[in-house]
Image: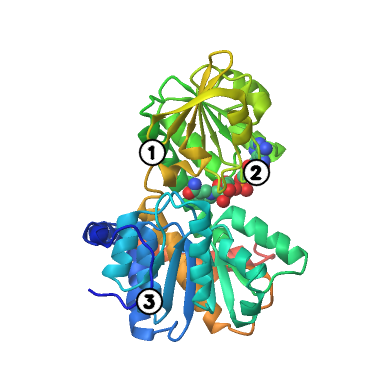
Amino acid sequence: MATTKRFDVKDLALAEEGKRRIEWADRQMPVLAAIRKRFEHEQPLNGYRVAACLHVTTETANLMRTLKAGGADVVLCASNPLSTQDDVAAALVDEFDISVFAIKGEDNDTYYSHIEAAVDHKPHLTMDDGADVIGVLHSHRREQLGDIIAGTEETTTGVIRLKALEAEDKLGFPIIAVNEAKTKHLFDNRYGTGQSTIDGIIRATNVLLAGGRFVVAGYGWVGRGVALRARGMGAHVIVTEVDPLRALEAAMDGFEVLPMEKAAEIGDIFCTATGDKHVIRREHMERMKDGAILSNTGHFNVEIEIPALKSLAKETRQAREFVEEFMLADGRRLYLVADGRLVNLAAAEGHPAIVMDMSFANQALAAEFAVENAGKLERKVYVVPDEIDREIARLKLDTMGINIDQLTEEQAKYLASWDEGT
Ligand SMILES: NC(=O)c1ccc[n+]([C@@H]2O[C@H](COP(=O)([O-])OP(=O)(O)OC[C@H]3O[C@@H](n4cnc5c(N)ncnc54)[C@H](O)[C@@H]3O)[C@@H](O)[C@H]2O)c1
């Protein structure tokens, strides 16, 4: 199909392969498919322009199709320079007539020029994974802030940045924090990132987890998913934390908890999952064993202090695709996976579609909610309404063929009443 849209993708000849993979993912995204069907009929986004900055994957493609089915005029750019699936970008342009600006491995300048191109689309709604579109709009494209009804934010790191903007009273439009929906972070961050992070590390290194010491930094939703899956594959898992409650949870979940200083000396594989900066620093690298593998699954590639690693190295070389070897002065070699970027998206395919089904159902319904409430929301960070969250959980259970009990009238009365609560 010829496109009338503007785009910048690697190669349109990849479109057919991309389409096949998008359809494969779609089969595992029944909740989003049901929303798409309703959107086609009801056209809730008719006349609205959407600028989405998300990982350009098969699952995102199905979200873009859903928004378009609802009447939206959509443009998509990448939320990470390494996570784009070029065949998917091509298919969106060529098969689904959606503008895409994303090329896997694009340099920093191209990455930001693609975000600018999405902003050129003059969106009424933004959809971010890490708040990059919002960042551009709040810096040198402020004249467009007034045209925007609302934005949605997909990830923990983005929500933290946006809450900081809200606290300073600098948020230019309302935000719906999709990450805060239970049907998002309890499943996507934990099970989706947990599995795909292990997948990324294994694809990049072909290392055996069984019997190795696997250090997870951060025991939030992502960290606990990674720890759980690494243990499942036979690794001895060590958790590092700064929050006493979460450290306690990790200990009672049966993991060894150590400060990074100590974990650094014994770990074989490291994975940061904190959303924080320089969690693995020079002083830790100086203590690491020869052959230690360093990876990150947090949003930005700042969790491992890469400049320190570079300055410690007397030689570097590409050991494998996605694995850089740093030879230190004393002969030890440390291995950095995927440039310290989200390993599950850079070296594997990101989350399985079945969990993205819920995350992106939240995105689609949050967009509809934003339009329904246009002009009524304040310049604040909102959580996804509880009814939407519960409806998605209900639909997901339905599609999994799982039935649950209903409260009887007597039980509902008992639970709601003080007098009966004895
Ligand atoms: N790779 C992916 O596909 C993917 C998916 C979802 C979220 N994320 C990203 O993963 C990161 C973590 O997300 P989350 O939902 O688990 O967040 P979270 O807030 O639930 O957990 C982060 C944890 O890290 C801990 N922490 C902070 N600084 C630390 C330090 N210096 N050392 C050890 N622990 C530290 C915090 O105490 C917290 O428990 C974020 O950047 C998020 O955007 C990535």
Q: Secondary structure at mark 2?
A: loop
Q: Earlier in the sequence, mark 3 or mark 2?
A: 3
- Residue under circle 2? 276
- Nearer-the-camera pick, 337 or 248: 337
Amino acid residing under circle 1 = Asp
In the image, is the residue at mark 2 within 8 Å of ligand 1 by its beta carbon?
A: yes
The mark found on residue 68 in the picture is 3
Amino acid residing under circle 3 = Lys
Where residue 72 sits, quadrant-wise, is bottom left
The location of residue 280, given as percent across then percent down, is: 62, 32
Q: Give yes or no for contact between labels 3 and 2 (Cβ–Cβ under 8 Å).
A: no
Which residue sits at x=42%, y=49%?
A: 105
- Residue under circle 1? 199
> How many angstroms separate mark 1 from mark 2 (CA)?
23 Å
Where residue 94 sits, quadrant-wise, is bottom left
Q: Secondary structure at mark 1?
A: helix
